[in-house]
Image (cartoon, grey):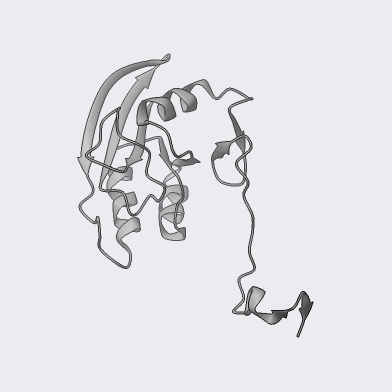
Amino acid sequence: MKIAVAGMGAGGLDDTVSPVFGASPSFTLVDAEDQEFLSIEIVVNPTFCVLGTAAAESARDLAGRGVDAVIAGEFGPEAVQVFSSAGISTYRLQRMPVRDAVKQFLNLAADTVRAVGRGTVPTGYVTSTYGGGVGLGRQRWLGGRPR
């Protein structure tokens, strides 16, 4: 199984998982089987710091490299669309070394990760859904009561 992990730095097992897929400067590709790391490849993100559809281009590049799963803190809608159409799973893990994220993914321990929508998040990690409107949110509240 080939796993791609978005990194915050130059990549590698000691790098930290990036909080945002599209904003990661590198990807660490780990080929693993039966809890063992068979090979490790570091790929520089060619679209790092590029606005627009950069995340989708990075996602297409990883799909072309034959990855089976991708780990990052968050994924944008363009990247999710590319991965889902290619049959690649996305997993939301962050604030840990790449090595630990891959081990956690390979273990898939019930007390470590749980399925939420697309991919997995650490237990206790609170996800919330916000409306898609253009409302003013908390600005419409004055003194604890609505306007």
Tell which residue pokes out farthest to the right in this image.
145
Q: Which residue is at a point 28% across and 44% down the rendered structure image?
A: 64
Up-down: is 114 above or below 76?
Answer: above
Residue 107: percent from left, percent from top: 51, 20
75 sits left or right of 67 in the view: right
Up-down: is 36 above or below 138?
Answer: above
Q: Quadrant of residue 129?
A: bottom right
Residue 81: percent from left, percent from top: 45, 55
136 sits left or right of 11 in the view: right
Residue 17: percent from left, percent from top: 38, 39
Q: Which residue is at a point 75% across and 78% down the rendered structure image?
A: 143
Which image quarter holds the N terminus? Answer: top left
60 sits left or right of 10 in the view: right
Q: Which residue is at a point 66% across and 74% down the rendered structure image?
A: 138
Is residue 65 something that shows in the picture?
no
Up-down: is 66 above or below 102?
Answer: below
94 sits left or right of 64 in the view: right
Tell which residue pokes out farthest to the bottom in this image.
147
The residue lying toward the viewer, choosing from 113 and 79, is: 113
Q: Which residue is at a point 63% across and 25% down the rendered structure image?
A: 111
Is residue 99 something that shows in the picture?
yes
